[in-house]
Amino acid sequence: MTQTLASPYGVTGSVQVSFFGKIADQFGRTTTVEIPVGGCSLPWLKAQLAARVDGGAEALAERSLRTAIDHLIIGEGAWIGSGQEVAFLSMFSGG
């Protein structure tokens, strides 16, 4: 299921957000988020997502969670531009 989150700003862009691993259980596989046309910070995007899901803030604050923009792992200080692809990756375990 794809869900669009609206921005409180007039002119917007959007990013495609994907979730992998355990975090997908809470958020689903993908969603599109409207962001300000000039882009947004990663904490801003996380706040928008967290507000939509019970327990979302805790899930997005998980220490082992990794975030990628356009397939590159990034840090909390990253800036996200319209049209970029954001992915949240829970740690995987396997045998």
Image: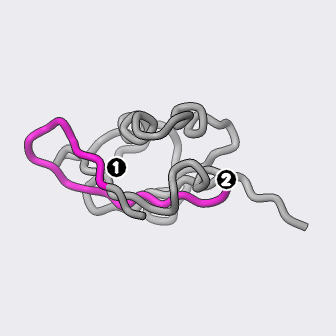
Q: Which residue is mark 1?
A: 80
33 to 20, vertically: above or below? above
Q: Position of residue 4 (x, y in %)?
A: 29, 54
Categorize mark 1 by other alpha carbons within 10 Å: few (<14), some (14-19), many (20+): many
Categorize mark 2 by other alpha carbons within 10 Å: few (<14), some (14-19), many (20+): some
20 to 46, vertically: above or below? below
Determine whether label 1 and label 2 are within 8 Å by CB: no
Left or right, 4 with reference to 69: left
Q: Nearer the viewer, residue 84 or 14?
A: 14
Amino acid at pointer 2: Lys
Q: Residue at x 16, y 48 (%)?
A: 37
Left or right, 60 with reference to 47: right
Q: Quadrant of the C terminus?
A: bottom right
Q: Secondary structure at mark 2?
A: loop
70 to 7, vertically: above or below? below
Residue 42 picture quarter = top left
Q: Which residues are magenta?
A: 4-21
Q: Position of residue 38 (x, y in %)?
A: 19, 46
Q: Which badge, 1 or 2, comes first in the chain's sequence?
A: 2
Q: Position of residue 43 (x, y in %)?
A: 42, 34
Q: Residue at x 51, y 57 (%)?
A: 28
- Per the model, the C-alpha gap separating discs 1 and 2 is 23 Å
Q: Which residue is mark 2?
A: 22
Left or right, 62 with reference to 53: right
Using the image, tell me which numbered label, if any, was put on residue 39. none
Magenta stretch, main secondary structure class: strand
Left or right, 78 with reference to 84: right
Q: Position of residue 15 (x, y in %)?
A: 32, 57
Q: Residue at x 20, y 44 (%)?
A: 36
Residue 78 picture quarter = top left
Task: Mark 1 vs mark 2: give the one in front.
Answer: 2
